[in-house]
Amino acid sequence: MSKYQVNEKGYYGPFGGAYIPEMLYPNVEELRQQYLAIMQDKSFQEEFQQLLRDYVGRPSPLYHAQRLSERYNANIFLKREDLNHTGAHKINNTIGQILLAERLGKKRIIAETGAGQHGVATATVCALKGLECVVYMGEMDIQRQAPNVARMKMMGAQVVAAQSGSKTLKDATNEALRDWINNPVDTHYIIGSVVGPHPYPDLVARFQSIISEETKKQLLEKTGNDQPDYVMACVGGGSNAAGMFYHFLDDETVKLIAVEAAGHGVNSGESAATTALGREGVLHGSRSILMQTEDGQVVEPYSISAGLDYPGIGPQHAWLFKSGRGQYVSITDDEAMQAGLRLTQLEGIIPAIESSHALAYLEKMTFSGKENVVICLSGRGDKDLDNYMKYFNL
Amino acid sequence: MQLNKHANGLLSIYFTAGYPSLDSTLQIAKMLEEAGADFLEIGFPYSDPVADGPVIQHSSEVALQNGMNIPLLFEQLKNLREQVSIPVFLMGYFNPVLQYGIENFCKSCKEVGVNGVIIPDLPMYEYEELYRDIFEENGISNIFLVTPQTSEERIRYIDNLSTGFIYVLSSNATTGKTLEVKESSAAYYQKLKDMDLKNPLVIGFGISSAQTFQKATEYAQGAIVGSAFVKLLGEPDYMDKIPSFIQGIKGL
């Protein structure tokens, strides 16, 4: 058993667990008892693999970015999760969880969403399976992300405004948890990231682990070596990073770099750089690192990228950070926006602003020309055009 | 501290510390005792109260804006036992307690004379493994919840781990919903009553009137009113209305 994977008690080192009220216990316990057996079942795997191939479009390419490589003096590979159906890695998890929900006999799906990517990915699989879908989204985010709200509605989902607290992702998550408390029998909650009570961080990471599984095979084909020098990904809650790191965790020669959003700067008071600013605490059902006041109230984060705008990180990331296995760094709004434009101009790929954070960190690294570097391009930038237009006066 | 297992018709009132104003906590507690409440739950506010409905969420938000936090609450409760003699429990979420320090928290509870705590998102496993000894050394009861979905085996387990009372949720719901005594919930209360647990039962969530209070206390030693009372605290002259509110619930 890897020391970086969850143990039988639901913990990663000191992080994880299931800090949930009794009202959620039966649902979470049912999931804990059944998720591994269901996921290992042959019929599940067949359907999952078939949908990933024929519906999502996997395997996603591992693209050797020639001009980017020249600029940084390294062999840079982009794992093209942006080419998935619905435009990001999020669908890997929602496909997996909808099949899980079906096998648990659930009739109704709920989800939280920030920018709307996970909400769209959830609405998509609910349409695919004909299941009722309710997506909680902060009232502020509903106003900021109209196209994704429209997508969800077209697919038949009900989008409910979270009006509590700061009316963003954290509050949408609270509302989804409240819905689950009030609907304890027939509802499955599709959490969008590697957060929440055990077993969610593990099951979401398993569904996303397809990213690194494919990467290893593709690297071997392209370079003759399945061990890159660096693997990089952005981290909000941390699901694309968890999937990108998954099959490299025990290979300590592979350096893992997780890039958080520094917003206007780590110490600006407007940031989402959780490992830099947070302390150990409990939020949304797990013990991890979170941004909070001295007396334990959760602090509202800020990032230009809605997908990284979360005050915590998944418990596995907290453990990779604390144990030193991963290097956790941060990138400001400005650095990310420039990196997004740079990739567009060098490679003709418009990245999601989330993914641009990972790309931006290349500017701070030095290479000797020999290193193989894999960056998870977690999503495409279509949803961010408004932001890019405003930022660059396009 | 153990509530009397043979008592009946006990009324407990929940309210949020620091709501409606920062220094209202102790005055409200005192008034509730005078008005006839049998024990109290004082909530300490948290930014992300996932088990609560809109009324208690709002009170927590206002309390936090007013500047309420755990150190200040203990400061306010310093003279609790000169003014209030009925049992007092603190209720809230785990993260603020974790940041204050579990051991500090239990010691502070003991110092001011708080009898127990209700922390819905502190799991049994962590409580048993890590914190039980600290609670017991300080004589602080930790109250667990059961719901209609909780298995009989788990209820027995909770009963063994509990000192004080068992907090029986009227339904699987967030706070502030209206209790309906359906046949299924009557069967659930009856099952609990017939299990003859060592701890007294107190029913909470959805108790808001004389009728719901009376229904609940047919099966349990007591019942808890939360959201309905917190709503009252949002009204003008709420202090003057407390006695009639309590008498109304008790059906006096």
Image: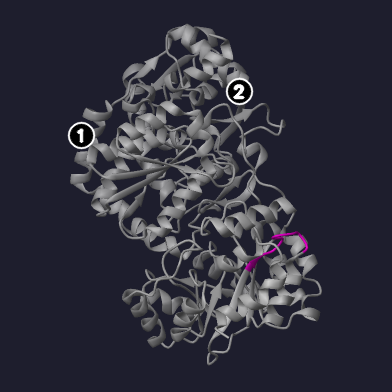
Per the image, the residue denoted by label 2 is A333
Residue in the foreground of this view, choosing between A332 and A371: A332
Where is residue A370 shown, x and y percent of the image? 49, 14
**Can you see residue B136?**
no
Please identify the dominant SS of the magenta region: loop
The numbered dot on residue A50 is: 1
Membership of B17 in magenta stretch: yes
How would you rate the neighbour count of disc 1 (Cα within 10 Å): few for under 14, some for 14-19, many for 20 or more?
Answer: some
The numbered dot on residue B199 is: none
Q: Give the structural element (helix, strand or loop) at label 2.
A: helix
Membership of A210 in magenta stretch: no
Q: Is residue A57 left or right of residue B67?
A: left
The N terminus of chain B is located in which quarter?
bottom right
State the CA–CA distance, disc 2 to disc 1.
38 Å
- The answer to whether residue B101 is above or below residue A298 is below
Residue at 75%, 53% (x, y): give it: B67
Q: Where does the magenta region start and end? A: B15-23
Q: Which label sits in the foreground, 2 or 1?
A: 2
Where is residue B17 shown, x and y percent of the image? 69, 63
Residue in the foreground of this view, choosing between B209 and B29: B209
Residue in the foreground of this view, choosing between A337 and A130: A130
Residue in the foreground of this view, choosing between A38 and A116: A116
Residue type for callout 2:
Asp
Q: Give the structural element (helix, strand or loop) at label 1.
A: helix
Chain that bears disc 2:
A
Q: Quadrant of residue A246?
A: top left
Mark 2 or mark 1: name the one nearer the start of the chain. 1
Residue type for callout 1:
Gln
How would you rate the neighbour count of disc 2 (Cα within 10 Å): few for under 14, some for 14-19, many for 20 or more?
Answer: many
- The answer to whether residue A363 is above or below residue A204 is above
The C terminus of chain B is located in which quarter?
bottom right
